[in-house]
Image (cartoon, rainbow, N blue to C red):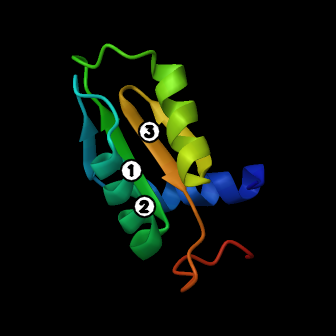
Amino acid sequence: MITPKQRAKLKKISHSYKPLINIGKGGLSENTFKQIDDTLNKREVMKIKILNNNLDDRDELINQILTELNCDFVRYMGNILTIYRESEDKVIDLDD
């Protein structure tokens, strides 16, 4: 779990990031999870865009991503989900 102070720092870091994954009417697949997992291993924090044509419940979709990939929720604003997971290389230092 990340603290509110760490969450604020992650929001600031990810502010200029663009969504790297779009989730549309196809929903979540094994390939989507693999892409998210690979990106989190490299960057630790990323944005995911949930398109309007997605028919799944957004809360369930977010919970499925967080649970399946063991990552932390940072922010959900508009259609953009921001998530964080610490990697072995530790790209972002949250201990400031």
Counting residues from the start of the chain, the first of labels 3 and 1 encountered is 1
Q: Amino acid at mark 1?
A: Phe
Task: Give the distance between the C-alpha atoms of the residues marked 2 and 1, in whole angstroms.
Answer: 6 Å
Q: Amino acid at mark 2?
A: Asp
Q: Is residue 87 above or below residue 37?
A: below
Asked whether the beta carbons under mark 3 and mark 1 sit within 8 Å of each other, the answer is: no
Q: From the image, state whether disc 2 or disc 3 is nearer to you.
A: 2
Residue 16 can be seen, yes or no:
no
Tell me: 6 left or right of 55.
right
Return the residue at label 3.
Answer: 81
For mark 2, give the secondary structure.
Answer: helix
Return the residue at label 2.
Answer: 37
Task: Give the distance between the C-alpha atoms of the residues marked 3 and 1, in whole angstroms.
Answer: 14 Å
Residue occupying image coordinates x 23% and y 28%: 26
Q: Is residue 63 above or below residue 60?
A: below
For mark 3, give the secondary structure.
Answer: strand
Residue occupying image coordinates x 34% and y 35%: 28
Counting residues from the start of the chain, the first of labels 2 and 3 encountered is 2
Q: Residues within 10 Å of mark 1 (few under 14, many from 20)?
A: some
Q: Residue furthest bottom?
A: 89
Return the residue at label 1.
Answer: 33
Q: Which mark is residue 63?
A: none
Q: Amino acid at mark 3?
A: Leu
Q: Name the quarter where the N terminus is drawn.
A: bottom right
Q: Residues within 10 Å of mark 2 (few under 14, many from 20)?
A: some
Residue 96 can be seen, yes or no:
yes
Residue 57, percent from left and from top? 45, 15
Q: Picture quarter containing residue 14?
A: bottom left
For mark 1, give the secondary structure.
Answer: helix
Query: Total number of numbered labels?
Result: 3
Q: Residues within 10 Å of mark 3 (few under 14, many from 20)?
A: some
Asked whether the beta carbons under mark 2 and mark 1 sit within 8 Å of each other, the answer is: yes
